[in-house]
Amino acid sequence: MADILPVSNLKLTEIEEDLEKLAEGMADVIEEGHYTKDMPELNQKKHHYVFVYGTLKKDFANHSIIRSQLMVGCGYTTSDCFIMGIEKSARFPVALFCQDVAARAKLYGEVYRVSPFEIRMLDNLESNGVLYKRYPLSIDCCQSDGKKQTIYAWTYIGLSNWWKSRTNRLEPAMLCKNEQFKYYLYTKKEQNPKDVEPMRYM
């Protein structure tokens, strides 16, 4: 387990340079559907559930991708094995699997019913298999009609191999607590980078 030390004055160009290098190295293999290797399996169902905890949520930057899809409700991951960081320059969240009992918690987010086509769009946005990986996670969901149910929904979790070497770019996300458990919440009012504490990783 290593500490993640805050780094100030990080420029967005550093992320862009990393992604450019990544794209150059993969130029020969990136093609339509590259990030969605399981498209044939996805096409076997008309709809899928997806759980979003960051910029895809309602009123956030990337919500337009799923705006036309049915919002099922809000909820939490059944598991509390996550830690969340906020990328300091671009300000997007990264949820990672975590073994540190003191730091880990559930994730709070929204559940949508989407088509295989939207899954492919989300895979491209999240660079599925490179920056994030799409996992089927159990979600305790409260539907718009007040009914509660546990469903499996695709969720994008950061890939350790990519983020572990870039942990100095992450600051802790907001950790909340109710009467039953702790959970990470991504909001529009994130912490001031000058005031954050070191984030523990895995």
Image (cartoon, rainbow, N blue to C red):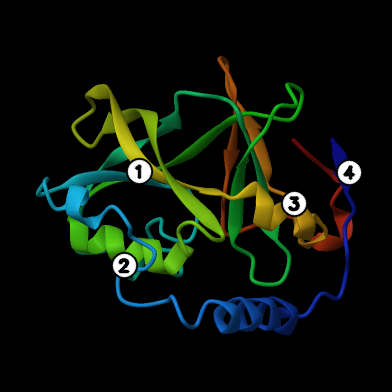
Q: Residue 164, labelled with which disc?
A: 3
Q: Position of residue 99 (x, y in %)?
A: 70, 27
- Residue located beneath label 2 in the image: 121
Residue at 83% x, 59% y: name it: 168
Res. 29 in view: yes
Quick check: marks 2 and 1 in contact, CB under 8 Å?
Answer: no
Give the Cα separation between the discs numbered 4 and 3: 11 Å
Residue at 55% x, 80% y: name it: 23
Identify the amino acid type marked 2: Met
Quick check: marks 4 and 3 in contact, CB under 8 Å?
Answer: no
Q: Is residue 148 above or below residue 23?
A: above
- Of circles 4 and 3, which is in front? 3
Identify the amino acid type marked 1: Trp
- Residue located beneath label 1 in the image: 154
Give the Cα separation between the discs numbered 4 and 1: 29 Å
- Residue located beneath label 4 in the image: 3
| Crowd around label 1: few <14 · some 14–19 · many ≥20 (10 Å) | many
Q: Position of residue 35 (x, y in %)?
A: 39, 64
Give the Cα separation between the discs numbered 2 and 1: 13 Å
Give the Cα separation between the discs numbered 1 and 3: 23 Å
- Of circles 1 and 3, which is in front? 3
Which callout, 2 or 1, points at the residue further toward the start of the chain? 2
192 lies left or right of 73: right
Which callout, 4 or 1, points at the residue further toward the start of the chain? 4
153 lies left or right of 147: right
Secondary structure beneath label 1: strand
